Image: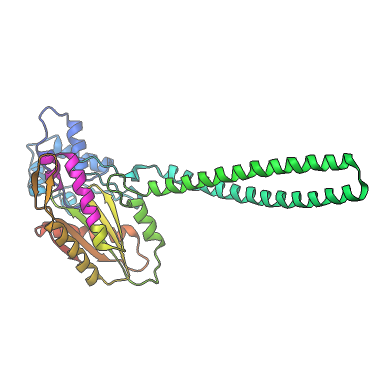
Amino acid sequence: MRDVRVAGSIRGARPDTTLFERIGAFLDEQKLSPDPAHYAFAYAVMSAPGSDLAAQVAALTQDGVRLTRSDIERLGGTVVDEPPSGRSRRTNGAADTNPDQTPDTAIALVIETQQQVDGFVQIVRTMQAETHGFGRELARSAASITQLAEIDEIAEITSAMIARIHDSEVRLAAATAETDSLRSKLIEARDTARRDVLTGLPNRRAFEEAFATRDRNAGPYCLALCDIDRFKRINDLHGHGVGDRVLTAIGQAMTAECAPHLVVRHGGEEFAVLIGGIALAEAADMLDAVRSTVAGKRFRNRETDTALGVITVSAGVTAIHADEAAETAFQRADQLLYTAKKDGRDRVCAG
């Protein structure tokens, strides 16, 4: 569960919004799923804005700090853990164009279809080779029959058969070309399903696959979670279009600084990095270089030529333990990221 998020839209909700809308906004800002336990806690907070519970929540979320699990449980609520595939993060105030929204069933269908196409291509190629070989043998046999028996009718029949086989070879070649093209498109579709539309970076699904298939003998691995500080303020002051360009620019900067390690847009204004082959201290230095690079950039609104001010990122970096689940490592990196935010932002916490 993310531990830092600006909660201004909850405290500043319009008075004409319904209780249902306020509860939904609260769940969204606290990144709580619509589980009945989460809904009950949100209802208790939002239905009685003058209550002691609402006052405590307002105090805890002041200055953009999100409620932690311990905060919610101490206030009498319950946090229901989600499975790894259910980790869903939306841009805080910006349109989230994360292609992870593609249903898993669609991805499975693409994979299954590609496997079928691969099998069909192999069958067609085998048929093509066998037919071509049979055509050559039949041509030689027809020549021998004609020379030995000089029977015009046999020669005509075999010539007709050779012509039909040649025609079949042409059609088979065309079918092979079409299936090759379809297979290429399916490969492209699989890549698209693993790439963030907005930034062009790999997405969370790509990260999960890379995590699961990493070579555990290739040295130590680390996981970093990076978050743009006060990103909602950028969207509020300059609009979502500017926010989207900031996201893209920072994603590109991270990719350049962290190469050849995998950098993905993990959701919203958050990026994840799968770091292989280096120890935790070196990984933390690399992320600190990313932080310094971003802090040194001077972003401007190209429509108005207005300076956006200094934009910073915070990061949590942790070593991935042998055979631990991705969600376990994410929770640890998430807590380190929260510590970096709590300690003043624009910093890297490792552990």
Q: How many marks?
A: 0
Tell me if 106 is positioned left or right of 347 in this view. Answer: right
Q: Main secondary structure of the magenta part?
A: helix
Residue at the spot x=84%, y=39% of the render? Answer: 156
> Is 344 placed above or below 186 here?
below
Please identify the quarter of the rendering in which residue 291 is found: bottom left
User: What percent of the width, then of the height, locates residue 161?
Assistant: 78, 41
Residue 110 magenta-highlighted: no
Q: Is residue 57 above or below residue 227?
A: above
- Report if residue 235 lies within the magenta region: yes
Of all residues, the one furthest to the right in this rendering is 149
Highlighted magenta segment, given as a residue range: 231-253
Question: Does residue 286 sit above or below 314 in this rendering?
Answer: below
Front residue of this view, candidates 171 and 63: 171
* Quadrant that contains the C terminus: bottom left
> In the image, residue 231 lies at what x, y percent?
15, 47
In the rendered view, tell whether residue 148 sits above or below residue 35: below
Percent position (x, y) of residue 323? Answer: 37, 66
Side (left or right) of 99 relative to 173: left
Any part of residue 321 in sight: yes
Q: Residue at image x 21%, y 51%?
A: 249
Q: Residue at x 22, y 45 (%)?
A: 31
